[in-house]
Amino acid sequence: MKLFKFVNMLIPFNKPYMTGNELDYIRLAHHNLRLAGDGEFTKKSQEMIASSLSAKGSAFLTHSCTAALEIAAIATNIKPGDEIIMPSFTFVSTANAFVLRGGIPIFVDIRPDTQNINEDLIENAISKKTRAIVPVHYAGVSCEMDKIKKIAKDNDLFLIEDAAQGYLSKYKNNYLGTIGDYGALSFHETKNIISGEGGSILVNHPSNLKKIEVIREKGTNRSGFFRGEVAKYTWKNIGSSFLPSEITAAFLCAQIEKGLEITKNRENTWRQYHQQLESLEESGLLKRPVIPKECLSNSHIYYVVLDNKIDRERTLEAMNNKGVNAVSHYVPLHSSPAGKKFGKFSGSMNITNRQANSLIRLPLWVGMSNNEINHVVRVLKNSIKI
Ligand SMILES: Cc1ncc(COP(=O)(O)O)c(C=O)c1O
């Protein structure tokens, strides 16, 4: 078979990290002749996710964070016309999962320090039709969850955390994804812990477990059937095929086992960037990311926000021409064709627009050498274009 040849950047934005056990575990799944979902590796990885997050409820493996959000939208019974509050500075799936059910995303502006939804603007966005708040923990740094949780409780709204980037990050004493009613994690190849494509839904109230099992298994009670609870499984409710195969779960098990080492290695790179870019912040050329004192970050992304006078596109182009694959991030959803068609925004989107046009993510992957980190910083310094 002819394999694709990739053109390698000198320093790519991301390099998926392999722990070394992935293929052994996949071989075991192959040996066990169990390849479809919900076998031993799925069970094991679900237990490991839940225990690594000290979760009160359970984790279900899904084929993506997108799937986890779609499950949450079905589980919260989002109906046409229901409104869901979320930031615009996020990935498509945060909104699309609810639009699939006829929901209307209500976009709220972000904070300039963390790029997370501005908790002080949420109450203004609430109407009689609001059903849920979906905070997105950007770069693995938590939103202001005490305030957001209180707003959700006072207004009887579901709280669904988009913790795609937040595995092993914390807000105060709680891991991200375990604070709301549901939490959605991603194990996509670009995340800290990976399985190619992959995700998990954290179900934080035990009373919802059975409902999620049915939605995740094509709307059937197949999971109950496998436990011997029913003689035949049948169609119980709407759902879809949201579970990954054992091959994916086997790969993921190897990754979760090394979760803390992976996070520590990323943290080391994150800190080096942070120290070395202090002088650029002092000279007013950029702002470095802020981690509020309540938050423990998993160092998922290192980004900088360039000052207004700097041309982000020319800066990125110059960096990439020098072999450093720095990248921008989300196109705000309120400005996208589908966002305009399906969503609305509450208040101004000034901070979202400004940050989205000025933010640069730097290469960050497990195993980056000091030389590589120094090189990225040097290239950034030399590439800043006014
Ligand atoms: C905030 C956010 N939510 C959801 C997703 C979707 O994750 P997945 O690719 O696992 O479906 C992403 C992907 O990067 C994301 O950044």
Image (spheres, rainbow, N blue to C red):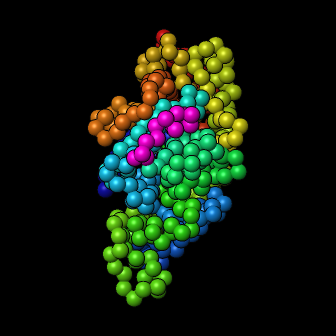
Left or right: 98, with 39 as reference point: left
Magenta part of the protein: which range? 116-130
State the image quarter where residue 240 is shown: bottom left
Give the number of callouts. Answer: 0
| Residue at the extreme bottom | 231
The front one of 58 and 281 is 58
Image coords of residue 10 (percent x, y): 49, 32
Image coords of residue 165 (percent x, y): 53, 45
Q: Can residue 311 be found in the magenta stretch?
A: no
Name above or below for residue 319 compared with residue 71: above
| Residue at the extreme front | 128
Q: Quadrant of the N terminus?
A: bottom left
State the image quarter where residue 112 is shown: top right
Q: Can residue 122 be found in the magenta stretch?
A: yes
Q: Residue at x 41, y 66 (%)?
A: 216
The front one of 163 and 281 is 163
Image coords of residue 166 (percent x, y): 57, 47
Q: Residue at x 34, y 54 (%)?
A: 79
Name above or below for residue 381 compared with residue 42: above
Image coords of residue 300 (percent x, y): 57, 42
The front one of 156 and 351 is 156
Is residue 205 something one can see in this rendering? Answer: yes
Is residue 375 something one can see in this rendering? Answer: no
Q: Residue at x 64, y 45 (%)?
A: 146
The front one of 15 and 159 is 159
